[in-house]
Image (tube, rainbow, N blue to C red):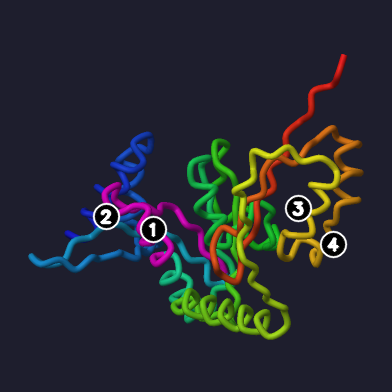
Amino acid sequence: MRALIDLKNIISKQLPKMPKEYITRLIMDRNHESLLLVKREAVGRRIIGGVVYRPFEQNSFVEIAFLAITSQEQVKGYGTRLMNKLKTHLQKCKIKYMLTYADNNAIGYFKKQGFSTVPRMPKHLWFGYIKEYDSGTLMDCYLNPDIDYDNISKDLKKQKAALLGAIKKCYNLKRCRGLDLARKEQKMEDDGLRAAFAEIPGLLESGWDFESYKKSMYAQCLSLIHISEPTRPLYISYAVFCLKKKKKKK
């Protein structure tokens, strides 16, 4: 009971426009269930958030009524961890969908958790079962039974590492030295620019030659004023080409 009261206080503080009596009624309702997020501290444990939902087992979905994290613990990944724990629990209960009416401030969060503003759940399964809110946006999320939501972050990191490993095997990495811009004050005419293009390591190999530059200069009235060396010696590095718009002669 103490834990539910702490959760009620967190939700009331994070949702000040929601009537406290309504929050208390749903949390204490036997048809609703709550999943609490508890943080271990030196002096003990403290509830920092939770989610209140109502399951409809016969239709394989749940309605999320409230989800809140204390303001001091927000933007630390606790909301995502809480949602992943809820998904894992609902998978064990053979639940396929989660539905919620999200306000404008919560739409971004729910989208990050896999919710969509375009309902994928058949309407006849939920229509008439949940209360509709004019000020909220209906969102739903499909629970894929093949996904381990508890370890989804680790799985994504493994996939990223495997993808980068495959890319390293097929790309041709060539690191080039930087430019010597000691003569940057010297005025560059066509011959000087053509020589500069030949001196820039990797520029011709990339398909950018002097003739292409001349065409773009005439088309857009741009002139080359500076070329910087690659920003960092990593697999993904790039050179910066600074272009200046030419003034038209009167």
Q: Nearer the viewer, mark 1 or mark 4?
A: 4
- Contact, CB < 8 Å: mark 1 with mark 3? no
- Measured in 3D between alpha carbons, the distance from the residue under mark 3 to the one under mark 2, in whole angstroms, is 67 Å
Q: How many neighbours does mark 3 have within 10 angstroms: few (below 14), some (14-19), or many (20 or more)?
A: some
Q: Nearer the viewer, mark 3 or mark 2?
A: 3
- Measured in 3D between alpha carbons, the distance from the residue under mark 3 to the one under mark 4, in whole angstroms, is 15 Å
Decide: is 245 above or below 172.
above
Count of numbered badges drawn on the protein: 4
Which label's residue is closer to the chain start, 1 or 2?
A: 2
Quadrant including the C terminus: top right
What segment carries the magenta color?
61-82
Q: Nearer the viewer, mark 3 or mark 4?
A: 3
Q: How many neighbours does mark 1 have within 10 angstroms: few (below 14), some (14-19), or many (20 or more)?
A: many
Q: Label for residue 7?
A: 2
Which label's residue is closer to the chain start, 3 or 2?
A: 2
Decide: is 19 above or below 67.
above
Which label's residue is closer to the chain start, 2 or 4?
A: 2
Residue that carries the numbered disc 1 in the rendered image: 52
Quadrant including the N terminus: bottom left
